[in-house]
Image (tube, rainbow, N blue to C red):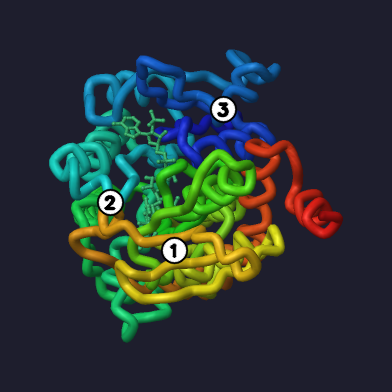
């Protein structure tokens, strides 16, 4: 039987990797795209230009806050698997737009589950749940499927609703519905205002002479950062099991934002000398003494998740999933991609050039 996937959030980081992966697996892939005044398909333009387009790859204008078009799309497409990745996904921004975040990241999940239930309910469903469900208290780390939830943002609270309504539809209507509780995952396709991409993009711009310095918020926050390409495989694996369940995906290692900064500069052979603390913390080029990093309280959040470190033992045992890219590999991949894009050279080429000077 032809497998048919429906992906909300296909224009996002994860949606684009997942669409590629499912097409390679022989799926027919349908994606939900929001109408923008300027194109938002840069991550999937290669698929639109490929031979798959309108043969095995279809895009539909809709919005997950609009239940009527979710009903229509589910009834027309008749997917065998639904991946609900659409969300207002920025934690910091959720404090600025809490009500919209509740709609797009929370209540929309109910609308999609209802559309599936009303149309027969026999497709498999993946919900993009998150480590932001956990409060990030050090004594709870490493966090697993059994760690108590304690969301600390409008985003986390909206995702908590989505998590439980997914469990509720599984238990009430016997739906094959899974929550992937995913820790942070990044890539060269990561949105530019998430901290990892902000760092690698800024460093590329700094060495290309296009930006003075990098300004950040809380540099002590710890995150368990993996590669998005590894995580979308885990999403798919969850839907191939005999029974539905909820799984943590994580790398099982954790690093501070400051360590990410050091490691990214380190890819270019630049060592950082830190001085001060809190809002007065500054990072200087260890050789030239130039100011490269400072703190701007504008990027602090009203409440912060301080310490995330995931335990993916269940997914490793039950799904056979394991991350392939580690922290160092992820930083190198992102730094290299941004340097090539901004300055037209790899990190190795930059370092060779520096040595010749
Ligand atoms: P992105 O922010 O890159 O992508 C979000 C996607 O959702 C975009 O395609 C966006 O469309 C779409 N979207 C937002 N609001 C709506 C709406 N109202 N109607 C239709 N589409 C909408 O997120 P990621 O790819 O990084 O993450 C995917 C999912 O996984 C999200 O739900 C996120 O919260 C969750 N998650 C992510 C983690 C991570 O570390 N990346 C970790 C754990 C969970 P547009 O392009 O038009 O803006
Ligand atoms: P997060 O990712 O909030 O974990 O949510 P983000 O990269 O935004 O922040 C990570 C940590 O870095 C700190 N930080 C900064 N963050 C941003 N964005 N910009 C800054 O300048 C900055 N300086 C310090 C933050 O305070 C935070 O502690 C991501 C999203 O993808 C969610 O959708 C997903 O659910 C979680 O990961 C798991």
Residue 19 found in image quarter: top right
Q: Is residue 54 visible?
A: yes
Question: Closer to us: mark 2 or mark 1?
Answer: 2
User: Is the CB of mark 2 within 8 Å of ligand 2?
Assistant: yes
Q: Quadrant of residue 195?
A: bottom left
For image coordinates 65% across by 64% down, the residue present is 270
Q: Is residue 130 left or right of residue 59?
A: left
Task: Tell me where residue 240 appears, x and y as whole percent.
Answer: 55, 51
Secondary structure beneath dot 2 equals helix
Residue positioned most to the right: 356
Q: Residue furthest left?
A: 99
**Ligand 2 occupies quarter:** bottom left
Residue corresponding to mark 3: 44
Q: State the mark number for residue 247.
A: 1
Q: Quadrant of residue 64?
A: top left
Q: Which residue is mark 2?
A: 92
The crowding category of the residue bearing disc 3, from other C-alpha atoms within 10 Å (few below 14, some 14 to 19, many at least 20), is some
SS for tag 1?
strand
Question: Do the CB atoms of the residues marked 2 and 1 lie less than 8 Å apart?
Answer: no
| Between 247 and 331, the one nearer to me in the picture | 331
* 300 or 26: nearer the viewer: 300
- Which circle marks residue 105 in the picture? none
The percent coordinates of residue 274 (x first, y second) are: 49, 74
Tell me the quarter of the image containing the C terminus.
bottom right
Provide the secondary structure element on which disc 3 rests: loop
């Amino acid at each position: 039987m032809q497998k048919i996937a429906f992906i909300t959030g296909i224009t996002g980081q994860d949606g684009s990797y997942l669409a590629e992966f499912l097409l390679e697996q022989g799926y027919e892939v349908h994606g939900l795209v929001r109408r923008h005044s300027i194109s938002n398909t840069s991550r999937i333009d290669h698929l639109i230009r490929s031979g798959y387009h309108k043969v095995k790859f279809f895009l539909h204008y809709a919005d997950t806050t609009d239940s009527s078009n979710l009903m229509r799309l589910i009834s027309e497409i008749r997917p065998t698997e639904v991946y609900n990745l659409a969300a207002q996904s920025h934690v910091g921004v959720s404090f600025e737009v809490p009500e919209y975040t509740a709609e797009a990241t929370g209540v929309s999940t109910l609308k999609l589950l209802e559309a599936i239930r009303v149309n027969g309910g026999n497709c498999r469903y993946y919900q993009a749940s998150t480590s932001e469900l956990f409060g990030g208290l050090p004594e709870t780390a490493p966090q697993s499927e059994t760690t108590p939830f304690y969301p600390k943002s409008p985003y986390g609270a909206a995702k908590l609703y989505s998590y439980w309504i997914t469990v509720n539809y599984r238990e009430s209507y016997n739906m094959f519905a899974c929550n992937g509780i995913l820790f942070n995952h990044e890539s060269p396709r990561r949105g530019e205002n998430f901290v990892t991409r902000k760092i690698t993009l800024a460093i590329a711009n700094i060495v290309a002479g296009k930006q003075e310095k990098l300004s950040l918020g809380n540099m002590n926050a710890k995150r368990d950062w993996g590669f998005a390409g590894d995580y979308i495989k885990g999403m798919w694996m969850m839907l191939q099991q005999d029974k539905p369940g909820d799984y943590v995906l994580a790398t099982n290692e954790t690093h501070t934002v400051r360590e990410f900064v050091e490691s990214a500069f380190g890819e270019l052979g630049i060592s950082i000398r830190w001085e001060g603390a809190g809002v007065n913390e500054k990072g200087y080029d260890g050789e030239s003494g130039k100011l490269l990093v400072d703190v701007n309280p504008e990027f602090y959040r009203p409440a912060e998740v301080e310490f995330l470190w995931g335990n993916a033992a269940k997914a490793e045992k039950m799904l056979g999933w394991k991350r392939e890219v580690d922290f160092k590999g992820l930083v190198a991949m992102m730094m290299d991609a941004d340097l090539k894009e901004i300055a037209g050279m790899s990190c190795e080429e930059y370092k060779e050039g520096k040595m010749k000077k």
